Structure formats: structure tokens, C-alpha cells
Image (cartoon, rainbow, N blue to C red):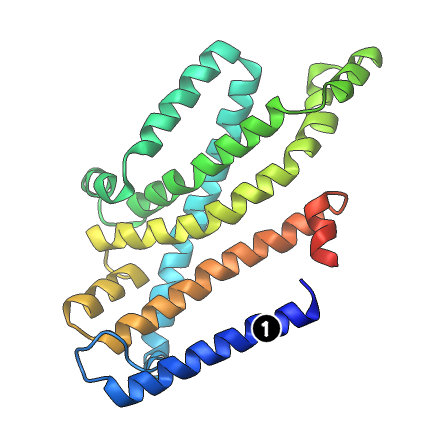
Amino acid sequence: MSRRARLAVASFYVLLLGAWEVYGRLAYEPGKLLPPPTTILRTLWEMRDAYLRDAWVTVQEAGLGLLVGVVLGLGIALLVDRFARMGEGIYRLALVLYSVPLIALAPALVSALGIGLRSKVAIAALAAFFPVVVNVTTALRSVDRRVLELGRLLSVGRWRTLRFMRMPYALPALFAALKIAGPAAVIAAMIAEWVGAERGLGLALLYAMFGFQLPNLWAILLLSTLMTGFAFAVFEVLGRVATPWHASAQRGER
């Protein structure tokens, strides 16, 4: 993005926030939908200790769930690639499982695993694993045939072909999946906290919603947005570092 385009985007956001602030100052009343941004920021600052503790709980749940989901997703993708028939069945089962809305699946998992950490990790893992499965499986199936033919001519074994030829080819797809899976794990952990939790940002959001504490509600939404945006940005940077040769990384440097 050029400097001029960035300035235009920044100006748009400044104008949007300014209009929101003016509207909030003139029309906002307690219990109405849109408190002004300054009220939201003040609430976030006043509640920072409680909300940061809740956010740390959610980060732990989402982080562990993301780790489990990525390992599970990579395992299934490699299984699909290695054992075509059996792997295809597992892949289709994963598709069916992912088609069930998390908000419907969460109560069953919380009742089965309890309101502690395990249920939150399980739900976050379910949200994270599917993008990894789809992207990595598709990337492994799309490796340039000339690369594979070169491996055969050089008598490279299956494992070395996977490690040195196919997995590097799949790395950009993996990091693209992680940019989706990271924020998805945070959102899923918060959904799980709605169903049953002792602490967490999702539970704080639920209390604010039921109590019609709209500045608190918007403050929590802002904090959760910062968390998901940070997760996306981390994997964006890691993807550029890990795959400097890829076109997406080169575009990001310009």
C-alpha cells in the first residue's frame, strides 16, 4: 500500500471515530447502544486490572487450543497425504465435525469436560484445526509435479521429499491458515466461557451484556478485537520471516 493510500485510510478512520464521538456526546444516554469512544476507553482504563486478568485466562485457553488444533490439523493433513483412502475418510469426518456450529457444540463439550480449562481448550482446538487441515492438505496436493519428478530422478526418499520439497511448498498455506486459526481460537474460547466458566473475557462480556453495561461491553469488545488482531499480526510477521521467498512476503515489504 502506497503512502498516499495509507494516509487516506488513516484519515477515514479518524473521521469515523470523530463522527462517532460527536454522535455519542450529543445523542448517547445510559442504556443506549453507542457510547462515545472516549467513554469506552475510560471504562477500559478503569477496569484494566479485572479485564487484563480475564484476558490472560482467555489467552491461555486460546493458546493451548491453538497448539492442539495445529498439531491435530497437521497430523490429519499428513495422514490424508500418506494414506489416501483412510485419510480421505478422516478428512470428511473433520468436515462434518466442523460443520456443527461451535455455539451448539460448546454446551455438550462443557458438560462432558467440565467448566475448567479442558473444555475451553477443546473448543478452541476445534476452531483452529480446520483451516490448518484444509490449507495444508490442499497445498500438499498442489506441489509442482516438476519438483516431485526431480525428487524421483535424484532417488530422494518419501520422508526427505516431504521434508525438503513438499512441506516448504506448503509453508505459505500453513501460515495463511494460522492467520485464521489464531483469531478463531480466541473467539471460540470466549464462546466456551459463555456456556460455563469461572473467569475469562467471554464471561465478563456476558455479565456486561446481561447487565446492560454498554461501556463495559464495548470495552471488552475492543480488548478482544485487539487480541485477535494481535494474533493475526504475529502470524503475518512469522509467515514473512519463515517464507521470505514467497510472493506474499515480498509484497508486504514493498
Vertical placement of residue 215 versus 148, above or below: below
Which quarter of the picture shows residue 160? top right
Camera-side residue of 32 and 86 = 32
Q: Indicate the amino acid at tag 1.
A: Ala
Which residue ends up furthest to the bottom in the rendered image? 26
- Name the side, left or right, on which 216 lies relative to 87: left
Residue beneath the point at 45% across and 51% down = 63
Task: Tell me the SS state at disc 1.
Answer: helix
Q: Position of residue 61 (x, y in %)?
A: 38, 52
7 left or right, relative to 100? right
Q: In the picture provided, is 154 more to the left or to the right than 165? A: right
Q: Which quadrant: the N terminus? A: bottom right
On the rendered structure, is 38 left or right of 155?
left
Q: Position of residue 227 (x, y in %)?
A: 45, 62
The picture places residue 248, in percent across and down from the top left corner, at 68, 47
At horizontal 73% and vertical 26% (from top left) the residue drawn is 165
Query: Residue 9 placed where, x, y %?
Result: 56, 70
**Whether residue 196 can be seen here:** no
Quadrant position of residue 25? bottom left
**Is the residue marked by circle 1 packed among few (<14), some (14-19), or many (20+) residues within 10 Å?**
few
Q: Nearer the viewer, residue 191 or 52?
A: 191
Depicted 91 relative to depicted 200: above or below:
above
Count of all numbered marks drawn on residues in the image: 1
Please tell me which residue is depicted at 28% across the width and 34% down the height of the picture.
Answer: 100
What residue would you read off at disc 1? Answer: 8
**Quadrant the C terminus occupies:** bottom right
Q: Does residue 16 appear in the picture of this structure?
A: yes
